[in-house]
Amino acid sequence: MKFTLSLTPPAHSAARRRSLLATWLGTSRAVLYCSIIPLLAATALSGALDSARRWVLLTVGFGAVIFFHELGHFLTAKRFGVRCDVFSVGIGPRLCGWRKGVGFTFGPAEIGPAQPPESPSAEQASLTVEGKALAGTSTASSGAASETAPKEPIGETDYRIAWLPFGGYVRMLGQDDMDPTKVSDDPKSFTNKPIWQRMIIISAGVVMNLILALIIFAIIFRVGVAFPPAVVGSVAWNSPAQKAGLQVGDRIISINGSKPRGFLEFTDLGMAAALDKPGQPVTLQYQRGNSQQFHTARLVPVKSMNTGFLAFGIGQMLTTKIARLSKADMQFVLEFNPTLKGIASHVVIAAVNGKPITSYAQIYQALQTCNGHPLAITLTNSNPKIATRTIQVTPQLTLRDWVTGNPALLGMYPRALVSEVLPDSAAAAAGFKAGDIILRAGVQSHPDVAQVIRSTRSNPGQKLAFEVLRQGKVLTLNPTIASTSGKGQLGVAITPDFANPVIAAVNRRDANLGILPGQTIAAIEPLDVPSAATGASSTVWQVQSWYDVLRIGKLVAGKPAVMLLRGSHGQISKVNIPMVNAATLDEYEYKLGLPCMPLLELQKTHSIGTAMLMGLDHTTRWIDRTYQTLFGLSRGSIPTNQLHSIVGIAKVGYDIESRGFAYLLFFLGLISVNLAVINFLPLPIVDGGLFVLLILEKLRGKPLPLKVQAGIQLAGIILLASVFLYITVFNDIPMLFHH
């Protein structure tokens, strides 16, 4: 914000001016302290000098982006003879600066045309000093008023650094963003210049931001920066990617026939879906495995239940290298899968079941064909002191992305298993332990996961009787269910008991066939399926776990079968299944449970010319994406909770800087593009709004009335302040406190 105040001081007002100067310096210090205290607090909370370094880099980076924007305005204004009173790096009170004929000074300084210090007319002239009028004075480096005339002509521009290092501004004569009624009849006034010159001055900031983005992108692509490539790492259930036949390991080459210089990045893939018009198909060209053959798929993005964006249902590809794990991370991994004991950070999976592997896609294929059996994982390390070793890992059967609830396996549900007991919870107080199989929850016998959750949530504050199976013994536990927001909470993590093929619940069709909760699946006898197709020596397949049910179900899908069930007393009964319904089996997949690092590839060129072209590609691509984002917001395909103000942007930038300086540069390039686009929207206050007013002035032959312009600017201030406040309160602050 820029405030201009013009006063005519009375004679003999030197003491008054000194008082005003002291007051202003005190105010400046107060502003400084108020700005530094939150930064110091944030740094202290982060607990490291590295945090301060990252904030400084981020602040300087943001300041540089806005500095180049204002530099565009300044250079073109000077070129067309507009008087520029201030060119400031940063906002707020003046810290220090330089002016031709005056030199380098600290604290407030006069701006405007120079006047002889002793001239009587100078006592009547008005010189604006950051909202304080000081006439006929010149602030020296010592802060005292100079009584001697300068030896050289005084320049018209005060080049300054302000207290708050966030951006900057240019103050031109006759142009005030906050008050359009402040005009001037001076020939050097902005308002007295031809419309075409004013249009160039207004748009020069946007042009400079685009040039800056192009230069940043060109530099990082010449130096090289690693990005996730557009390689399929996972395929969500019932997603456009699954319906189109895409598989893990497929590499996307082009989108709608457009192939970028370098390789297609995973971000390009996500943005192509998120910014697409609802119902509009997107054509992807891809390669599979080591084949050089190109395949084509047409996908219509749908809204993801995870993000709210339109999406293809494609996840990012991983590598065979284990990520860096803290002690807490390692403990969590081992609780999820105890068979992973023996892994360490940064080790590499070199082989699975003795077969060498080079990509995560090979690990994924081995997982999906393991049938729940342990895998021999060979781990290597670049450190020669750590020997190569092999561990036995039991894969975990989990739900695929985009699956909701607990899908049935051939119409049946496994029992509920306690996988974790939270400390200081109702379950811990009652004696629950990890590994307990729940046989009864209240009046519900042989409950599945959903039934346990329903029984618990519907009894807040009440005692609820549980029967659990622990090491072959049946125990009765009576926890008092905790109440959280009116819902019961037991304090356990529950997963399906896949290891034991005991039926907990059945759907209506299977119940009508005679399948009952509590029975154990002993075998499945497929009909019309030759044993040669499965490699089995008999047409009756023994079932030892739900993993076997999953495997057999996929083989006999859509065909009749006979299921052998064992009752609680060991009696065997046969149930004829007219057609095996395997529709939900694809909702499950096996996972290793290892936190592997994401796949990154170096986006780099050795040619400066190619780097410039890649920079131009990224600049134009992000310009288009910014506009597409605005269109998506207007039609509702992009949720508003993805918007961020300067608070959220700073948090994202802070996190990105931890990945390396090149990533921060790339982020600042994106910010520069976004600033250019947003600043040229036809909204009051921003450059685009001023440009529209110039167009109206050209069409009308005269500018809009000053009161109308002031009303437009006021409406713009209210609009932008309201949007900023909404985004900060509802999007950014929750993000800061979200773990």
Image (cartoon, rainbow, N blue to C red):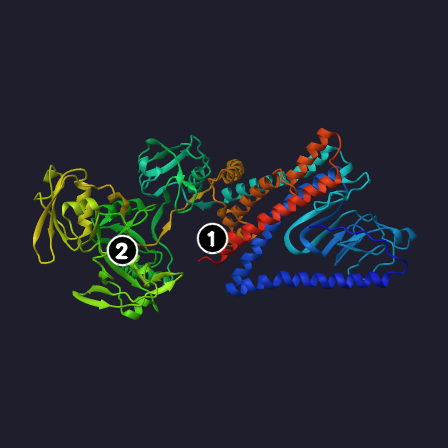
Left or right of 737 on screen, residue 302: left
Q: Disc 1 residue type? A: Arg
Sequence-wise first label, 1 or 2: 2
User: Around disc 1, counting alpha carbons within 10 Å, would you say few (fewer than 14), some (14 to 19), or many (20 or more)?
Assistant: few
Q: Is residue 545 above or below residue 281?
A: below
Left or right of 309 on screen, residue 176: right
Q: Considering the numbered disc 2 on the image, is that residue within a helix, a strand or a loop? A: helix
Query: Residue 295 in the image: x percent, y percent?
Result: 33, 31
Q: Is residue 339 above or below residue 646?
A: below
Query: Residue 389 in the image: x percent, y percent?
Result: 26, 58
Q: Considering the numbered disc 1 on the image, is that residue within a helix, a strand or a loop? A: loop
Q: Disc 2 residue type? A: Gln
Query: Residue 205 in the image: x percent, y percent?
Result: 65, 41
Name the image quarter holding the C terminus: bottom left
Q: Is residue 293 above or below residue 308?
A: above
User: Around disc 2, counting alpha carbons within 10 Å, would you say few (fewer than 14), some (14 to 19), or many (20 or more)?
Assistant: some
Residue at image mark 1: 659
Residue at image mark 2: 451
The answer to whether residue 410 is visible is no
Query: Residue 283 in the image: x percent, y percent?
Result: 39, 31
Foreground: disc 1 or disc 2: 2
Residue 77 sits in quarter: top right
Residue at (90, 55) in percent of width and height: 118
Cα–Cα gap, marks 1 and 2: 44 Å
